[in-house]
Amino acid sequence: MRNVFTLLVILTILGLSSCKKDSNDPVGCSAAWATEVQSEATAWSNALTAYSSNPTTETCLAYKNAYQDYINAIEPFLDCQAYTAEQIQELQDIIDEAEADIATLCVD
């Protein structure tokens, strides 16, 4: 659960940094990156809420899948040329931790 909040904080910091759209930038990084992953973030939040209130195998799998979808949606931002190497490495570290957490979800 710590990684969930850490991931959100890191993404907020990256979103508030000066990531401008560059025609050479493969993912078209913009200051409005959050809107680009809004549907995945909403699905992830909804799945977390459902799992927290009703921790069944079904809700766990839905949460796990939504979490992975969100990670998949933010991974292209690792190619944002406007981010510093430190920002990219920090995001990669958080993604790696999140994926390790995902691997442990719903395991009996």
Image (tube, rainbow, N blue to C red):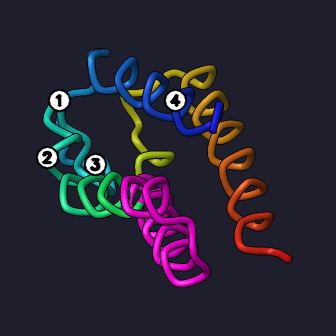
What residue sits right under mark 3 in the picture? 24
What residue sits right under mark 2 in the picture? 35
Please report whichever mark, 4 or 2, sits nearer to the chain's N-terminal start. Answer: 4
Please report whichever mark, 2 or 3, sits nearer to the chain's N-terminal start. Answer: 3
State how far apart marks 4 and 3 are (Cα): 31 Å
Residue drawn where x is 41% and y is 31% of the image: 11
What secondary structure is marked by label 1? loop
Residue drawn where x is 56% and y is 66% of the image: 55
Give coordinates of residue 101: x percent, y percent: 73, 54
- Could you tell me the amino acid type at mark 3? Asn
Please report whichever mark, 4 or 1, sits nearer to the chain's N-terminal start. Answer: 4
Q: Count the marks: how many?
A: 4
State how far apart marks 4 and 2 are (Cα): 18 Å
What residue sits right under mark 4 in the picture? 5
State how far apart marks 2 and 3 are (Cα): 21 Å
**Horizontal side of residue 50 vs 31, given as left or right:** right
Tell which tag, 4 or 2, sits nearer the viewer.
4
Magenta residues span: 48-76
What residue sits right under mark 1 in the picture? 31
Give coordinates of residue 108: x percent, y percent: 86, 77
Whether pointer 2 and pointer 1 mark residues with C-beta atoms closer than 8 Å, the reply is: no
Tell which tag, 3 or 1, sits nearer the viewer.
1
User: Between residues 24 and 76, which one lies in front from this camera angle?
Assistant: 76
Residue drawn where x is 19% and y is 52% of the image: 38
